[in-house]
Amino acid sequence: MAETKKSEGFTDEERAAMKERSKELKADARASKDRAAGERDVLAKIAEMPEPDRTMAERIHEIVQASAPELSPKTWYGMPAYARDGKIVCFFQAAAKFKARYATFGFDQEAHLDEGTMWPTSFALTELTATDEAAIAALVKKAVS
């Protein structure tokens, strides 16, 4: 006879994630109708980040907006993201949110980065140099081409 384990319900972290996702879905509906609302949500999330994540996220926001103004800012899993027709193209993940040693700038399946049979979809960031910024701008432009 198989032993069954009693579920103790959701953890505090899981409940917080569900609440965050619920807020995000409401914000997504607003952002779909009002680009400015999406940008306000993204900027608010960035403002909550500790350093150095905040500075990198602010700069990435500027780079994405300049490189692909057709992308709409929105939050995605509590992080800044940029979408086309409601689908995520690229996103930033703060190191602090996941207790990681580096932040991440990544691309989702809507990004047109396919090259051969293997290509990178995310990049670890510990800081942003001018060279890094130029590479991000070029990748974002390619992703929306």
Image (tube, grey):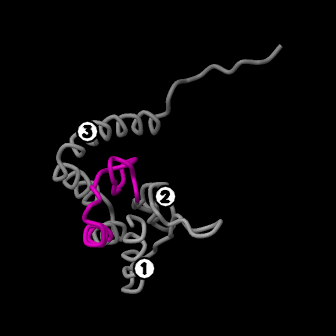
Q: In this view, does 91 lie to the left or right of 32?
A: right
Of the residues shown, which amino acid type is indicated by label 3?
Ala
Does the magenta portion include 80?
Answer: yes
Q: Which residue type does callout 1 highlight? A: Ala
The residues colored magenta run 60-89
Q: Residue at x 28, y 42 (%)?
A: 28
- Residue holding disc 1: 135
User: Residue 99 shows which numbered tag?
Assistant: 2
**Gap between marks 2 and 1, in whole Å?**
26 Å
Q: Nearer the viewer, mark 2 or mark 1?
A: 1
* Crowd rating for badge 1 (residues with CA inside 10 Å; few <14, some 14–19, many 20+): few
Q: Position of residue 33 (x, y in %)?
A: 19, 43
Of residues 71 and 28, which is closer to you in this image? 71
**Which quadrant holds residue 142?**
bottom left
Instruction: Out of 84 and 36, give the one closest to the viewer.
Output: 84
Q: Where is residue 93 in the image (x, y as percent from the top left)?
A: 42, 59
